[in-house]
C-alpha cells in the first residue's frame, strides 16, 4: 500500500509544477502578443521591399551586382539555422533539427563545403556533436533583438559572401502562422532571390520608370543590402513569434497534464487513507472481540 506521506508530497510537488507552467504560459502569451504586433508591422514593409526589388529587376539592368548575379559555380554553401536558446517549447526545435538532418543528407556530396551557422543554442548543441563544419554562432540573440542587430548579423554574412568565403547562404527557420501552427521555411538569403511582384498586371508593370538619385550604384547597393538585412530580420521575427506560440501551447498542455495528475493522486490518496482507516477499525474491532472472549 502506498505511503500517505509520499502521495501527499507528490501532490504538493505537482501543484508547484502546475503553478510554474501556468506562469510560463502567461509570460509566453504576453510575449507572443508583442511579437505578433512587431510581425504585423514588418510584413507590409517586407512585401513592399520584395515589390520594389522585383520591379527593379524587370525594368532595370541589375547585371554585374554580386548580390543578384551570384557565383558561376557554387562550391561553398552556408546554412543559418534559427532555433531557440531554451527548451520547453514543444516540437519547435526538434522539427527544424529533423528537417536539417534530412536536408543535409540530400545535399551530401553536392558541394565541396557545407557550413552550418546558428542563431540559438538548441541546433548548435545538436550539430556540434556531428561532423558538419561549424561557422558562426549567435547565442541569446533573439532574447532582445531589433533591426540594427539583425543588420549586424546580415553584414557579417554578406561580408563572408563578398570575400568569397561562401558562394550561397540559406536560412532555415519556423514561420509563424498562428499560435498553434508554424511552417518550416528554407530560403536563400545571399545572393538575393528576386521575388515575383504580387498582384501586378503587364499593363501596370510597363508603366514603371525608375530614376536614381544620387546614382544607380549607390541606391542599388543600399537597397540590396537592406533587402538582405530585412529578410534576416523578418526571419528573426517569424521565429521568435513561432517560438512563443509553441511555448505557450506546450505550457498549456503541461498545466492541464499536471491538473489531471493531481486529480489521480488525490483519488489515490483518498482511497489509501480510506483503506488505512478501515484496517485500523478492523484491528480495533478484532481486539475488542478478543477481550470479550
Image: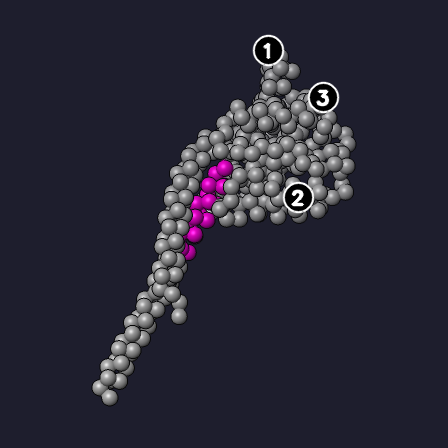
Q: Is the residue marked by circle 3 packed among few (<14), some (14-19), or many (20+) residues within 10 Å?
A: few
Q: Quadrant of residue 3?
A: bottom left
Disc 3 and disc 1 in contact, CB within 8 angstroms = no
Task: Compute the Cα span from label 2 to label 3.
Answer: 40 Å
Q: Which residues make up the magenta segment?
A: 240-259
Label 2 sits on a secondary structure element that is loop
Which is more toward the observer, 293 or 73?
A: 293
Q: Which residue is mark 3?
A: 64
Of labels 3 and 1, earlier in sequence is 3
Instruction: Report x, y in % for residue 242.
Output: 49, 41
User: In front of the other: label 2 or label 1?
Assistant: 2
In the rendered image, the quadrant that contains the N terminus is: bottom left
Q: Quadrant of residue 72?
A: top right
Instruction: Report x, y in % for residue 49.
Output: 55, 27
Q: Is the residue marked by circle 1 packed among few (<14), some (14-19), or many (20+) residues within 10 Å?
A: few
Q: Which residue is mark 2?
A: 129
Q: Quadrant of residue 293?
A: bottom left
Instruction: Report x, y in % for residue 32.
Output: 43, 39
Q: Main secondary structure of the magenta part?
A: helix
Instruction: Report x, y in % for residue 141.
Output: 53, 32
Q: Which residue is mark 1?
A: 214
In the image, farthest residue toward the left: 292
Q: Is residue 132 above or below residue 47?
A: below
Label 3 sits on a secondary structure element that is loop
Which is more toward the observer, 120 or 76?
A: 120
Q: Is residue 175 visible?
A: no
At a point 61% along the width and 24% down the height, the residue shown is 155
Q: Does the magenta segment cover residue 246?
A: yes
Amino acid at each position: 500500500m502506498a505511503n500517505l506521506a509520499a502521495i501527499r508530497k507528490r501532490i504538493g510537488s505537482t501543484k508547484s509544477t502546475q503553478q510554474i507552467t501556468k506562469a510560463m504560459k502567461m509570460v509566453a502569451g504576453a510575449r507572443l502578443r508583442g511579437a505578433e504586433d512587431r510581425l504585423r508591422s514588418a510584413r507590409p514593409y517586407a512585401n513592399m521591399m520584395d515589390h520594389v526589388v522585383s520591379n527593379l529587376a524587370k525594368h532595370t539592368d541589375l547585371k554585374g551586382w554580386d548580390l543578384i548575379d551570384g557565383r558561376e559555380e557554387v562550391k561553398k554553401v552556408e546554412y543559418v539555422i534559427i532555433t531557440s536558446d531554451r527548451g520547453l517549447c514543444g516540437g519547435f526545435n526538434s522539427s527544424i533539427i529533423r528537417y536539417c538532418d534530412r536536408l543535409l543528407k540530400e545535399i551530401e556530396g553536392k558541394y565541396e563545403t557545407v557550413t552550418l551557422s546558428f542563431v540559438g543554442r538548441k541546433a548548435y548543441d545538436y550539430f556540434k556533436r556531428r561532423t558538419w563544419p561549424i561557422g558562426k554562432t549567435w547565442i541569446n540573440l533573439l532574447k532582445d533583438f531589433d533591426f540594427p542587430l539583425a543588420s549586424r548579423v546580415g553584414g557579417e554574412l554578406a561580408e563572408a559572401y563578398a570575400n568569397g568565403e561562401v558562394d550561397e547562404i540559406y536560412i532555415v527557420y519556423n514561420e509563424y502562422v498562428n499560435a498553434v501552427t508554424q511552417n518550416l521555411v528554407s530560403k536563400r538569403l545571399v545572393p538575393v532571390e528576386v521575388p515575383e511582384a504580387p498582384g501586378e498586371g503587364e499593363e501596370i508593370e510597363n508603366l514603371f520608370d525608375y530614376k536614381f538619385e544620387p546614382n544607380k550604384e549607390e541606391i542599388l547597393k543600399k537597397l540590396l543590402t537592406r533587402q538582405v538585412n530585412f529578410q534576416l530580420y523578418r526571419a528573426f521575427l517569424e521565429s521568435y513569434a513561432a517560438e512563443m506560440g509553441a511555448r505557450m501551447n506546450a505550457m498549456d498542455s503541461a498545466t492541464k497534464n499536471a491538473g489531471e495528475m493531481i486529480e489521480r493522486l488525490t483519488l489515490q490518496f483518498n482511497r489509501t487513507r480510506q483503506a488505512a482507516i478501515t484496517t485500523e477499525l478492523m484491528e480495533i474491532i478484532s481486539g475488542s472481540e478478543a477481550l470479550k472472549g
